[in-house]
Amino acid sequence: CPGGQYQSSKGATSCDTCPSGYYCPSGATTFTGCTTAGKYCPSGSSSATKCATGQYNDGTYQSSCKSCPGGQYQPSTGSTSCETCPAGYYCPSGATTFT
């Protein structure tokens, strides 16, 4: 099966889509948990993906990342939390830097 799909039965004629919160590399016979905080695995993933800047993920088996709330920012990818906006600046929701 191609990446993002798996098949656990011998002699099958089709592959199953990897579920949300899991990933399936090429040739997978089962799905693997997306167990690294700071990453996410939507349905059909072939590998875990780092959260983008302005986002974070503090849990495991996640299908998406969360945007940093207003008053916080995140300049790095693959983060598990957001940083507090310093005094004298503002940070809208999903900020990658302070302004």
Image (cartoon, grey):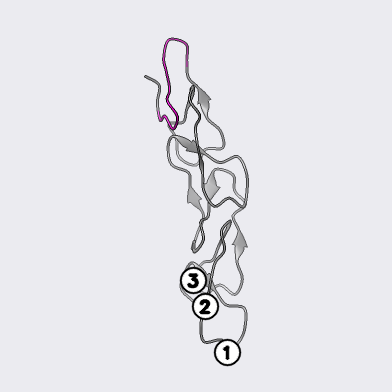
Q: Amino acid at mark 2?
A: Cys
Residue underneath mark 1: 11
* Image position of 1 (left or right of 31): left
Residue underneath mark 3: 26
- Spatial separation of the CA atoms under disc 3 and disc 2: 11 Å
Q: Quadrant of the C terminus?
A: top left
The disc, 3 or 2, on the residue closer to the chain's N-terminal end is 2
* Disc 1 versus disc 3: nearer the observer: 1
Label 3 secondary element: loop
* Image position of 93 (left or right of 19): left
Furthest-left residue in this view: 99
Q: How would you classify the magenta stretch by its main secondary structure?
A: loop
**Mark linked to residue 70:** none
Residue underneath mark 2: 15
Q: Amino acid at mark 3?
A: Ser
* Disc 3 versus disc 2: nearer the observer: 2
Q: Amino acid at mark 1?
A: Gly
Q: Which residues are magenta?
A: 86-96
Q: Estimate the x, y position of residue 71 in percent, counting from the top left.
A: 49, 22
